[in-house]
Image (cartoon, rainbow, N blue to C red):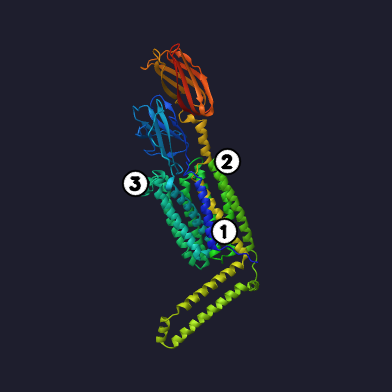
């Protein structure tokens, strides 16, 4: 009983449906272009209440970012700009910090800081927070609901990124498959179409990314894709330079494809063919490495630790992926559309794929260490979880590849003799008889037509013209149907007579389906914050949050009125350094005119309502008139604390005032 392969149309349709469903699931669960740089601190901090207006607002990031004149905006409670628009570069060593000056004479109230920038690995990041001067107030500022890099533009940009990865793999892997494994494939039309379409897709996807880059990192409006000023600014960035370089290299790739499927395919002299193959291989490798380098230049590998090692490793990783998965795609096309592909070609590709897997294992291990950094990040961060999914898919892919290799080994066994083939074909009586009858009928029709043509020729020129001017459309259509039936029967017989090749087709098709999903996961990984960065940002935000504001205590101002004589005034409280652990508390009691006010007693209590902690009493000591202090005030955990101050101005007159303060 012979084994048959699935029909190409049905199989490809199922593959596309499966890929679309899984890709949609992955992208639906992914945040649009998650940041690779993270905001680790600010001065003032989110939710802080300061007694007086600061001179500037500073932001600290985990990695280098590209800032423009409008990257940081400070808005007053009415939504008006409160900053001067003057960007200040405060970076020092490994500390990445930028600031913007504030206008003088800002009134009390709640201010909103909105920021948007691009991280060093090309992904847009944005955010907003508030702080208050004097005390919180109502604000009319509405924060944007859409994340940076999201919306329609973000979706289109993500699709273009996926298509560029996939088409690069098919372009490079297809060319390598023809040169290294199946030189005769350079003259096979389905293979030619596959590689040329990959080149076209990569070119169109790169152009789309270049046009969408401005709205993707800025406004998010699709109409801005045709803003020439925005396009000019994109071309001046690292990502714009990488995309432009990719387009130029694709011009060289077009020349490579033209020679491969033109001059090389037509060469018959073995020596000339070998020399041309060497030149194509050398030039193609340089062009492919250059195109892969455009990703390494603009994304993960260009930032973080060890970029000098990471960039060439990333190029090797991409080339290995292309050689394996791109070659696999062309092999699948050849198995279905060119059943005469030599068994030796499949064997050679099996060796190429095995070498690619070894390179992928080595480079992938290094990249995983570099991007994850710890076992906890592997399980507790989104990047680590996606990486585990990718590793699982890779394991499945290797298992299927092992099955394909077993089918390849069967193909490599000695083939039956021609007599044996004829005997086996004779056993398939139904198909052979149907084909023979169709061929006989087609030949009879052809001979009949030839006879009519000869009679017409013998009758003279006039008779020939008459025969040609009165063709029989019904007979021509019948002959065409018979020829199509012959071709279909022949293809079916060839497919059914080779169960090993049918099994290889199925395993390669399954391998390609898993590869499509694997590429989808890889695309999502490249737009997800690395685990190492996420963990470092988390540690900085909790245990080391003061690194961004090392010398700024929490300052609050609390007006009070006890109702008695000389009972009005203001309490100024300072908590230094204003974070978890031990703090020094200083409290100043002043009259409305700013002069010190001597009061009999002052008490302070701290409460964290969200965690049911407190009130924690603090009994400050009187230092001098109007000045009270306490050392070693312990704040056990971060959160929004309520600071209550009780002021007694006489034996019977006292009041309690409070304010919420966010403490890191």
Mark 1 highlights which residue? 509
- Can you see residue 436? yes
Quarter that holds the N terminus: bottom right
Q: Nearer the viewer, mark 1 or mark 3?
A: 1
Cα distance between the residues tagged 1 and 3: 46 Å
- Earlier sequence position, callout 1 versus callout 3: 3
Q: Earlier in the sequence, mark 2 or mark 3?
A: 3
Q: In this rendering, does residue 180 appear at all?
A: no
Residue 370, picture quadrant:
top right
> For the residue labelled by badge 3, is the local secondary structure a helix, a strand or a loop?
helix
Work out whether mark 1 precedes mark 2 in sequence or the reverse, and give the earlier one: 2
> What residue is pinned by disc 3?
229
- Indicate the position of residue 295 as horizontal and vertical percent values: 47, 48
Position of residue 224 relative to residue 102, above or below, is: below
- Between tags 2 and 3, which lies in front? 2
* Disc 1/disc 2 C-alpha distance (Å): 32 Å
């Amino acid at each position: 009983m012979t084994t048959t392969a699935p029909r190409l149309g049905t199989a490809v349709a199922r593959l596309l449906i499966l890929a679309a469903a899984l890709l949609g699931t992955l992208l639906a669960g992914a945040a649009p272009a998650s940041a690779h740089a993270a905001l680790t601190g600010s001065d003032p901090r989110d939710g802080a209440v300061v007694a007086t207006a600061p001179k500037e607002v500073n932001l600290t990031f985990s990695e280098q970012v590209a800032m423009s004149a409008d990257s940081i905006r400070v808005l007053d409670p009415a939504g008006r700009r409160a900053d001067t628009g003057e960007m200040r570069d405060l970076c020092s060593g490994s500390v990445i910090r930028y600031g913007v000056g504030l206008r003088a004479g800002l009134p009390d109230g709640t201010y909103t800081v909105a920021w948007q920038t691009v991280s060093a690995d090309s992904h847009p990041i944005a955010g907003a927070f508030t702080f208050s001067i004097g005390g919180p107030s109502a604000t009319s500022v509405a924060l944007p609901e859409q994340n940076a890099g999201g919306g329609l533009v973000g979706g289109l940009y993500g699709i273009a990124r996926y298509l560029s990865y996939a088409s690069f793999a098919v372009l490079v892997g297809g060319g390598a498959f023809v040169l290294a494994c199946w030189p005769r494939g350079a003259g096979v039309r389905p293979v030619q179409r596959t590689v040329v379409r990959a080149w076209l897709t990569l070119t169109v996807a790169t152009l789309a990314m270049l046009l969408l880059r401005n709205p993707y990192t800025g406004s998010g409006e699709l109409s801005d894709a045709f803003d020439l000023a925005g396009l000019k600014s994109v071309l001046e960035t690292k990502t714009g330079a990488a995309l432009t370089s990719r387009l130029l290299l694709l011009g060289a790739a077009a020349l490579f494809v033209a020679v491969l499927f033109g001059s090389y395919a037509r060469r018959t002299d073995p020596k000339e063919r070998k020399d041309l193959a060497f030149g194509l291989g050398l030039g193609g490798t340089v062009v492919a490495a250059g195109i892969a380098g455009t990703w390494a230049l603009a994304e993960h590998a260009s930032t973080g630790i060890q970029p000098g090692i990471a960039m060439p490793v990333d190029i090797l990783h991409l080339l290995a992926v292309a050689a394996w998965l791109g070659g696999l795609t062309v092999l699948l096309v050849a198995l279905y559309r060119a059943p005469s592909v030599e068994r030796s070609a499949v064997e050679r590709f099996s060796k190429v794929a095995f070498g690619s897997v070894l390179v992928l294992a080595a480079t992938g291990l290094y990249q995983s260490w570099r991007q994850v950094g710890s076992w906890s990040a592997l399980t507790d961060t989104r990047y680590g979880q996606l990486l585990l999914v990718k590793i699982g898919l890779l394991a499945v892919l290797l298992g299927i590849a092992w099955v394909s290799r077993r089918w390849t080994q069967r193909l490599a066994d000695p083939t039956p003799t021609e007599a044996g083939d004829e005997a086996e074909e004779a056993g398939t009586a139904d198909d052979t008889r149907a084909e023979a009858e169709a061929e006989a009928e087609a030949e009879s029709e052809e001979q009949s037509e030839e006879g009519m043509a000869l009679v017409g020729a013998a009758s003279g020129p006039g008779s020939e013209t008459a025969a040609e001017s009165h063709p029989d459309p019904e007979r021509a259509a019948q002959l065409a149907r018979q020829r199509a039936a012959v071709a279909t029967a022949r293809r079916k017989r060839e497919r059914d007579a080779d169960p090993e090749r049918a099994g290889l087709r199925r395993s390669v098709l399954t391998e390609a389906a898993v590869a499509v999903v694997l590429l989808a996961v890889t695309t999502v990984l490249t737009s997800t914050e690395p685990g190492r960065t996420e963990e470092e940002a988390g540690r900085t935000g909790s245990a080391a949050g003061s690194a961004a504001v090392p010398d700024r205590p929490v300052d609050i101002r609390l007006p009070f009125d006890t109702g008695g004589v000389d009972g009005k005034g203001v309490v100024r409280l300072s908590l230094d350094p204003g974070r978890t652990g031990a703090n020094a508390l200083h409290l100043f009691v002043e009259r409305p005119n700013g002069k010190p006010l001597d009061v009999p007693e002052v008490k302070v209590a701290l409460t964290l309502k969200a965690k049911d902690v407190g009130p924690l009493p603090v009994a400050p000591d009187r230092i001098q008139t109007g000045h009270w202090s306490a050392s070693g005030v312990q704040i056990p955990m971060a959160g929004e604390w309520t600071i209550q101050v009780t002021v007694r101005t006489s034996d019977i007159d006292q009041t309690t005032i409070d304010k919420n303060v966010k403490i890191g």
